[in-house]
Amino acid sequence: MKISNEQLALVNGRIKALLYADNFYGKKLKAASISEVNSADEFETLPFSEKADLRDAYPLGLMTAPEEEIVRIHSSSGTTGKPVIIPYTAKDVDDWAIMFKRCYEIAGITNKDRIQITPGYGLWTAGIGFQNGAEKLGAMVIPMGPGNTEKQLQMMQDMESTVLCSTSSYALLLSEEIEKRQLKDKIRLKKGVIGSERWSDKMRDTISNSLGISLYDIYGLTEIYGPGIGISCDENKGMHYFDDYLYIEIIDPKTLKPVPDGEMGEIVITTLVKEGAPLIRYRTHDLSRIIPGECPCGCKYPRLDTIMGRTDDMMKIKGVNVFPSQIEEILQKFDEVSSEYQIRISHLDGKDTMRIYVETNGTVDFMDLSKRIAEKVKSAIGFTPLVKVVEEGVLPRSEKKTKRVIDERYD
């Protein structure tokens, strides 16, 4: 999907603002002698921006609007290196709320819904993003924030919440607690808006069937407003994103060249109207594809496919490149195992080992299941892992994101 003339005009407005601010990206543009782009081909010569650039700009090197127009900052949730600080103008905050309102509407959520928000508030964009969009919609917000499952369930019953906003990990934990406490008849949930981490079809089915609700994938990242720049619809055929605010291209992460619509690659995002910290050709490292054609739901916004992983997810074990998504795809084919798994990589006696922990109920032969999973994994990646089968509920649950890959080689 080539950039349109209308989008090019908006990009040139952001280029002008960046050059005037003389911030980190403005300096990149000056060094490349770029003051505007007049075609899709010229646009594709613009330099990329990366998270490392954003960290180097700490604390306010990304700020493009005058400081007196900045009303808020947010920070990425990364745990390594310098944080990324993103400044927002009042218009940025409102634009984000408009996009999030659209997300709720695509999911069939209205101002008659009661929306329980469990992601975190503060420097992270999640909680406040869900809230701003819900308030723009005119729905009743129940701003719980993370954790305190006892209180979450009590408020869910007392307030008769109809929409749950959460990570998939916490939605799973809540669904298990509701089942354990036999609360399903007292819960009024109809829909779940789920984001922040990739989740499998098996996990989706578990949550949806347990709670009896429809689930929607929400997409976003702190550097690009936050969650709410795209969402799946009832057709569940990709996530609609808002091309009047964002231009999205998919590139080959090796050649860095755009790939045709329908081909898998890395998502690169350009913000078209962002004032506080506009980003041009920002490499997200998320892997997906643009889905060609119109969605059967009738929504005219273009679509991204489900996020398939990240270019930096790759693990090198015994000299073999392995992606967690490869393991997940294999595990999904075993009806006996739950959606939860954990991969642990160690270095013992001079060699790498990979252990895969999976859950099942007590009605199957653990040894036989372990052997069958190990054989399937070996046929896919070329070496045999150690597979440990445990009872359902043994693997850790999370109120935020579940850490599924633990590399102990560097501890």
Image (tube, rainbow, N blue to C red):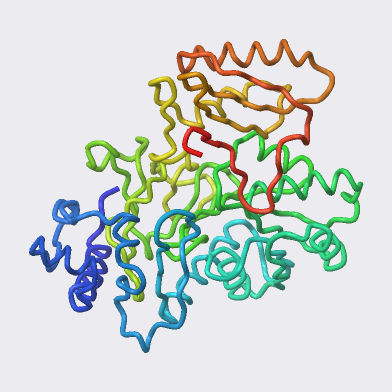
Coordinates of residue 2 in the picture (x, y in percent): 26, 50
Q: Position of residue 38 (x, y in %)?
A: 13, 61
Q: Residue at x 22, y 78 (%)?
A: 21
User: Which residue lies most toward the left here?
Assistant: 33
Depth check: give the residue in front, 326 or 111.
326
**As displayed, is residue 395 above or below residue 337?**
below
Answer with the quarter of the image where residue 212 lies.
top right
Image height check: is 293 above or below 279? above
Q: Residue at x 62, y 35 (%)?
A: 201
Q: Residue furthest bottom?
A: 68
- The one of 236 and 277 positioned closer to us in this rendering: 277
Instruction: Please tell me whether residue 286 is drawn above or below residue 62 in the rendered image.
Output: above
- Residue 148 picture quarter: bottom right
Q: Is residue 110 left or right of residue 19?
A: right
Q: Quadrant of residue 116?
A: bottom right
Residue 188 against residue 318 in the figure, above or below: below
Q: Residue at x 70, y 54 (%)?
A: 191
Which residue occupies the foreground of this view, 121 or 166?
121
The location of residue 329, given as percent across then percent down, is 55, 27
Q: Position of residue 179 (x, y in %)?
A: 86, 44
Residue 61 versus residue 185: which sits nearer the camera? 61
